[in-house]
């Protein structure tokens, strides 16, 4: 995969096709990444009712950071970041599975998943 650019466009060549990514498209993708991160932070701070909402908010933050990592790696021509993105996707999947299994166990024991009522987890 070869990346070249001029003043207004980024060209990505993967051996078969040439993809064109303009600066305007990259700015909108960066805006989308920051929007997902801030939406996740907003929902963690202000909508802390359920454990499922908290898990979805953390996933929004991780996916926003992942979008930003990939678009900045395309812009700066740094391809090692794709490996980091793959590792982040794996860690996000593991985090989702562990959080969902924990919420299922809590729901089976207490019949609710509200964060305010989870004081029985204190050691």
Image: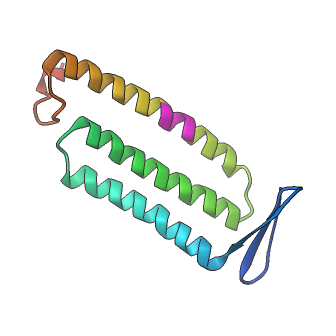
Locate residue 87 relative to residue 4 in the image: left or right: left
Q: Is residue 38 above or below residue 8?
A: above
Q: Main secondary structure of the magenta part?
A: helix
Q: Residue at x 49, y 34 (%)?
A: 93
Residue 92, magenta (yes or no) = yes
Q: Quadrant of residue 83?
A: top right
Residue 21: x and y in percent read 69, 71
Q: Toward the viewer: 1 or 80? A: 1
Locate residue 66 relative to residue 107 in the image: left or right: right
Q: Which residues are magenta?
A: 89-93
User: Looking at the rendering, in which quadrant would you find the N terminus?
Assistant: bottom right
Locate residue 119 relative to residue 96 in the image: left or right: left
Q: Residue furthest right?
A: 15
Q: Quadrant of residue 42?
A: bottom left
Q: Quadrant of residue 77?
A: bottom right
Q: Residue furthest bottom?
A: 7
Residue 94: x and y in percent read 48, 29
Residue 99: x and y in percent read 35, 29
Residue 79, magenta (yes or no) = no
Q: Is residue 52 above or below residue 123?
A: below
Locate residue 15 relative to residue 7 in the image: left or right: right
- The colour scheme of the drawn protein is rainbow
Q: Residue at x 44, y 64 (%)?
A: 34
Q: Residue at x 61, y 71 (%)?
A: 26
Q: Residue at x 28, y 42 (%)?
A: 54
Q: Is residue 68 above or below residue 23?
A: above
User: Looking at the rendering, in which quadrant would you find the C terminus?
Assistant: top left
Q: Residue furthest front?
A: 17
Question: What is the total number of numbered labels drawn onto the structure image?
Answer: 0
Residue 90: x and y in percent read 56, 34
């Amino acid at each position: 995969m070869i990346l070249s650019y001029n003043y207004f466009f980024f060209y990505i060549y993967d051996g078969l096709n040439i993809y064109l990514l303009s600066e305007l498209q990259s700015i909108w993708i960066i805006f989308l990444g920051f929007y997902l991160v801030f939406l996740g932070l907003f929902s963690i701070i202000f909508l802390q009712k359920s454990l499922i909402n908290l898990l979805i908010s953390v996933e929004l933050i991780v996916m926003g950071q992942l979008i930003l990592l990939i678009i900045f790696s395309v812009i700066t021509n740094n391809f090692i970041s794709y490996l980091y993105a793959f590792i982040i996707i794996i860690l996000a999947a593991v985090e989702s599975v562990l959080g969902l299994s924990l919420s299922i166990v809590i729901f089976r024991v207490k019949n609710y998943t509200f964060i305010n009522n989870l004081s029985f987890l204190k050691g």
